[in-house]
Image (cartoon, helix red, strand yellow):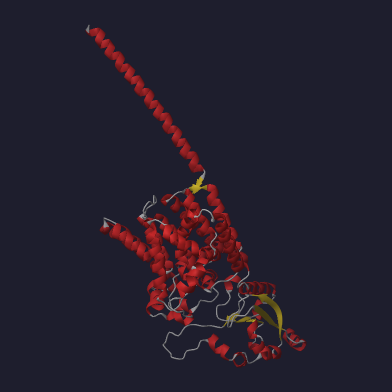
Amino acid sequence: MEPEGGGRSLAFRALQNRSHEKTKLRKRKSTLYVSAQDQSRRRGDLLGENIYLVLFTIALRIFNCFLVQTSFVPDEYWQSLEVAHHMVFNYGYMTWEWTERLRGYTYPLIFASIYKILHLLGKDSVQLLIWTPRLAQALLSALADVRLYSLMKQLENQEMARWVFFCQLCSWFTWYCCTRTLTNTMETDLTVIALFYYPLEGSKSKNSVKYSSLVALAFIIRPTAIIPWMPLLFKHFWQEQRKTDLILHYFLPVGFVTLSLSLIIDRVFFGQWTLVQFNFLKFNVLQNLGTFYGSHPWHWYFSQGFPVVLGTHLPFFIHGCFLAPKKYQILLVTVVWTLIIYSMLGHKEFRFIYPVLPFCMVFCGYSLAHLKTWKKPALSFLFLSNMFLALYTGLVHQRGTLDVMSHIQKACHNSPNKSSASVFIMMPCHSTPYYSHVHCPLPMRFLQCPPDLTGKSQYLDEADTFYLNPLIWLHKELPDDASLPTYLIIFNVLEEEISTFLISRNYERTAVFFHTHLPEGRTGSHIYVYERKLKWGNQQKMKF
């Protein structure tokens, strides 16, 4: 009997083993099938998203870049491209902020690297010097757009992500700023990418090292970048169970590395150890000397700045604030906090609150997602109104200051003897870019306006002194023919006041450029280029 039982036992075990083998084989096939699916999906991905979405965003921002042909504020040239040009080509002009060491070289170094590569390749034409840095900024802005989409897809779903993405892409102010070489643009891009790694509730991409590194880099480039991040950092610290580890293992090492890098870069270019972030905050926040360049009432951001920056997104933002879940309250708190802190400073500009604009798009997306009967009209209104503003500000408003530099650049390269020609820009200081848009060692001069750092009660800079009585100033500063520049560049509002000087010195208007439909104060609607025409007798003397 035992042999039979033993045989049955062996047969049962063999049957079990076969079933196990089959099961294992099925699992193996299933695993291979799933991994093949994942691999094919990954091949169609870029930056963790559908490759067509990413390529569309990149193409749109490049298109965006070439459709912005106007000037916004002087800092987009004088705190980036002009500094980079001086670093690489050893000529140009550095504003007082660099002699006083209020700005750091970390941001201009990015563009200086681009300029150096172009120079080594022998491709440093003026057009490439103008557009290559802006294209680089456009690519970074495209990355920020994709990261905002990815974050919303993690926090909500693909449909909600699409609405937020739509709001972000059709924002007129984002279109206007995101390809400009402004520290505010870099600050905004780094803030959005850092938010992707920030530990928001529901986020699957949390990474304390990555987000804190991006925040630290934004602070190095523009110290006020810490303002919108203060509520977010406090919330992370408050919710973190291992607070000591967060400080010692993440925040302190990241802060030490980035600050050390900034100190080394500035040590190389300044020639001495300088903590520019402290100098910047001391000047603009503690001493509030930024009011030298204009001041506004405390409510300006709430009554004008924020509504203008949001544009026609404003009603959707307000609607979305009532609909968004509780987990997004931290983003709303960040927006309000930033507006309040900047309202305490006298000097106010639209671009200062640009970094919180993508936060607002989250609430605008929620509004659009919950619209039912009026959704199509709302979408059409939002798109068309923003595109009108984007195209007008990008192609029409304040374009003359760039067009006139293209004219000077052509005159420079067409001139057989560059040292004999010279340019005097008699406009509000820093109205135009400078050598980064001419790329020619042509002698140029402009009216300067450094602030008073000595505490004088009745201080007037060169531009203020000039505009008090332009005619007297010109006769005093340009007393003889030897001191007269070849080209004078002025706004049309100044022409009548100095017409006698122009006639007596043989200047003729040779070019006119439209600038703006909204002239204000010293800024006119058109820019005039006057060229000095020598009389025949003088020309003969110069030849001999």
User: Looking at the image, which residue is at 28% across and 14% down?
Assistant: 10
Question: Is 179 above or below relative to 41?
Answer: below
Question: Is 51 above or below relative to 20?
Answer: below
Residue situated furthest top in the rendering? 1
Q: Which of 131 and 358 is in front in this view?
A: 358
User: Looking at the image, which residue is at 46% across and 52% down?
Assistant: 150
Q: In which quarter of the image is the C terminus?
A: bottom right
Question: Is 351 above or below relative to 16?
Answer: below
Query: Residue 224 location, x and y as percent?
Result: 41, 70
Question: Is 94 above or below relative to 372?
Answer: below
Query: Residue 507 location, x and y as percent?
Result: 70, 85
Residue 137 visible in the snapshot: yes
Residue 262 visible in the snapshot: no
Q: Quadrant of residue 359?
A: bottom left
Q: In which quarter of the image is the N terminus?
A: top left
In this picture, residue 244 sits left or right of residue 330: left
Residue situated furthest right in the rendering? 536
Query: Residue 165 location, x and y as percent?
Result: 50, 55
Q: Nearer the viewer, residue 201 or 180?
A: 201
Q: What is the tally of numbered marks visible in this picture?
A: 0
